[in-house]
Image (tube, helix red, strand yellow):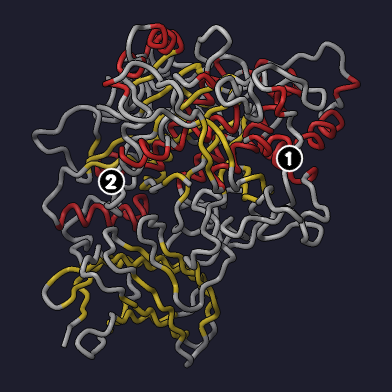
Amino acid sequence: MGNLSLQRVADDSGPLPWLDRAKAGPRLAMMVARAQARARPDGIARVFVRSRRFPFDAAGKPILPGLDPGFVTDLETGEVFAPGTPAPARAAAAYLYTTRVLLAGAAPRHGGPGCIPLGRLLAEQHVDWVREAQRLRTQLDWSTAEIGACDPRAAGRTRDVGGACAGEGAIIGVADYGVDFAHANFRDAEGRTRLLAIWDQNGAPAAPGGLPRGRAIERAEIDAALQAPGCPYAALGYHPHDNYYTDRKAADQEGAHGTHVLDIAAGNGAATGLPGVAPGAELVFVQLPAFDWKNPGDLAQGAWVYEAAAFIFERAARARKPAVVNLSLTTNTGTHDGTNPVELALAALLRAPGRAVVVCAGNERSKRIHAAGLAQPGAPQSLAWRQPAHDSIPNQLLLCHEGEEALALTLAAPAKEGAACSVALPEADGEYSLRWQDRTIGTVVTRGARPPGVAGAAPPLRQVAVTLLADMDGEADEWRLTLTAGAQPVAFHAWIERDDPDQSWFATSAAPGCTLGSLASCDEVIVVGAYDALAPLHRPPATFSSEGPTRDGRAKPDLIAPGVGILAARSLRGDPRQAGGRRRGRPEGTVGTGTSQAAPHVTGAVALLFAAAGNWALTMSGTFLRDLLRETARRDTLTPQAAGWDPHAGCGRLAVRAALDALPGRLDPPREAMAAPTVAKEAALAVAPGPAGAAGEAAAE
């Protein structure tokens, strides 16, 4: 007979007197405890920092030894400061940035520059809080006509769209995996690149005062590589299939996700004959860093997503142009209420006008990854958590409930040798090793607090995360989490983390609602679901497209866009290091399905709205654009839901022409009443550029 037990990880305040848990928060404290328990005091993480002091001094140097700030955002105005920017004359109330930290109280003897001990950072009075980042993963012919954006026969040339240009004057930025910069859809008629820059976030951290990691590849470098003899990818030192979010083989077989996404938003159709939504826009691409997706503790990805968005907005502000950022990235777990650090960072960036962020809703509606209910006193309720056979990836479940009422939890292992074992999960905050007989099979983490200053007087939110290590025994298992309320009923939600190769699921109590991705609960971003524009009789929301609302009841997604069978650019096949350029006769496009494909339709639409607004674009906020797209979305017989907002379809299907037609009357003052419009310097420059080489042309490495 088996024996299931919990063993508390040594994370008491006694052994770690330097750890300020109020500032660090429970999850980061658990990361520290894990590093200490594994005798890894030199463990490194990239974290978010909220501080009342600008992180660079008057000379542009970090204010603390080892501090490694990336882009800095003024939390009141959304102003972005490039790395190495001298401290502004007017201090803001608070700033947000990321930095690398040692998960220790002090630096070890072999510690180097560019990494500050967490204890040293927490000891600073100006630091309000430090938070861990979050894991994130990725998720045309008829579709542009379907949304009213263009006539596909106008491929390869700039065209009018409802009186607007094709995105000229706007910048589209994508943070993703793999851009094929040599694809003709991203080059102009003379063969030059349309990309302003690529920031490859892979590679060793840059020197102090520059980008926090990797290198910025400028337009001139890309053009030189395109003109060089032989392989352009080798000439540039960037390959769209390297550092992919799964593995190189998947990218070689299917094409890079980022190439497909960028082409839907803004490809010019030169190779495929099918232009994207805004083929006249300028482009910026950020290649996110590779990460260990088999390791649930690899949480740096969210920090780099913030850095990517800040980089794109900094470039746009330097050029005095509006910008929209596409994030076709998501995971499942999180509190789903807009309070995770990445969502807070995106909201801060969007406080400045001339910016928008578009996020995919997720593809989880039909995957049975969410359960919800009302636990009753004296009536235990069980959630059956099914694990697939030959599962090579750890599985994680997160349960959340608000309020002061107790909720007793019991975790039961699968029946082994005719007997099942269970263990009561503790109510006290902490991390526990889950053990089966004499071996560790997972962890249990309990925490009960929100980030300081986020939720105010809101009731505490208890979170219980259960992680089960990979089980390769060839048998499908079913674990059970039993919930029993105390004196009063307790409402709860539970999510299973995304695991594409071998997704686990709820065999009971699964609910399609509240399946939005981890970035899709931020109120300021535009959240996009998918619909099937290929359906012969109507245009229903795609069955996979994640549903709202958010856990705290807000209306997301905002709208839906085509996301089934989307044909767009495909990155190269094979290894170009062994063959120069692109091979004749192979397909230049590929078909993709998902909300990852729906989101860039809206990203392109936002670029068209920016272009149509002219000089007013730099006064338009992301929430203004969100509301305009919601109000003009199509809600007709092809979308058989009631008027208003729908959990699956949002406010309806994207209608670009309707939004463009409505735009002039929404401007303040209306555009018809204005002559020779001008834009205030404050609106045009919502960024403070850093010194030469901080993130500009001289920063390429």
Q: Are marks 2 and 1 in contact (CB under 8 Å)?
A: no
The outermost residue toward the bottom is 378
What residue type is disc 1 on? Glu
Residue 534 percent coordinates (x, y) = 67, 48
Q: Which mark is residue 292?
A: 2
Dividing the image into 4 quarters, which one contains the C terminus? top left
Tag in front: 2 or 1: 1
Q: Residues within 10 Å of mark 2 (few under 14, many from 20)?
A: few
Q: Earlier in the sequence, mark 2 or mark 1?
A: 1
Residue 358 percent coordinates (x, y) = 59, 39
Dividing the image into 4 quarters, which one contains the N terminus? bottom left
Q: Residues within 10 Å of mark 1 (few under 14, many from 20)?
A: some
648 and 208: which is toward the camera: 648
Residue 568 percent coordinates (x, y) = 56, 33
557 and 207: which is toward the camera: 557
Residue 650 percent coordinates (x, y) = 69, 54
Let me know if residue 96 appears in the view. no
Residue identified by numbered label 1? 146
- Residue at x-position 22% and y-position 63%: 12
Q: Quadrant of residue 464?
A: bottom left
Q: Is residue 200 above or below residue 261?
A: above
561 and 34: which is toward the camera: 561
CA distance for labels 2 and 1 = 39 Å
Q: Is residue 127 left or right of residue 193?
A: left
Q: Is residue 520 above or below residue 379?
A: above
- Helix, strand or loop at label 1? It is helix
Q: Quadrant of residue 437?
A: bottom left
